[in-house]
Image (cartoon, grey):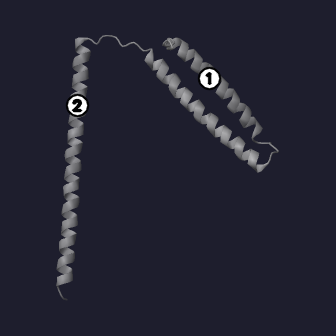
Amino acid sequence: MASPSKIPDISVLREMNLSSIDVLSKSLQRLRELRPGAAISPMLQDSLEADISMLELELRISMIAQTRLQAANIKVKQLSAAEVQTLDSLASRIDETIERDAVVNASLGTVEDLIATATELRNLVKSSTEV
């Protein structure tokens, strides 16, 4: 039975990821330098473009991971009673705004339904009357 591996410290993961970002960036830069004057077949050109796209994606993923690794190291201090009260007040304001928006959207939906019904009624009257 294999022994469980130890999970590296966040700082070690950040350093490893930064190293990966550096390697990806340099590789991407080198491929981009090849692109403009590359006297290669269309097939190889397509392959070059695919490699560039893949490296760009890998670089973005690594940068997102780096942001998450940095955020994982953030320590949040204990909130004071005043800060908790402010936070509760802000949450209430957000809830009220969401409720008002729901009421407005529901009202708009009712108006749209009324207009649609009036249009159908007008069409019915128009089609059943002779001029």
In front here: 101 or 21?
Answer: 21
The quadrant of the picture occupied by the C terminus is: bottom left
Within 10 Å of disc 2 (Cα), the crowding (few <14, some 14-19, many 20+) is few
Name the mark nearer the viewer: 1 or 2. 1
Read off the residue under disc 1: 20
Residue 36 lies left or right of residue 14; in this view the side is right
Residue 121 vs 26, above or below: the answer is below
Residue 122 x, y percent position in the rendering: 19, 74
Residue 23 lies left or right of residue 126; in this view the side is right
Residue 82 lies left or right of residue 49; in this view the side is left
Circle 1: residue type: Ser
**Dot 1 lies on which element?**
helix
Q: Quadrant of residue 117?
A: bottom left
The residue lying at 79 percent from left, 48 percent from top is: 41
Read off the residue under disc 2: 93
Residue 20 x, y percent position in the rendering: 62, 23
Seen from this angle, which residue lies furthest front? 1
Circle 2: residue type: Arg
Residue 33 vs 84, above or below: the answer is below
Residue 90 x, y percent position in the rendering: 25, 26
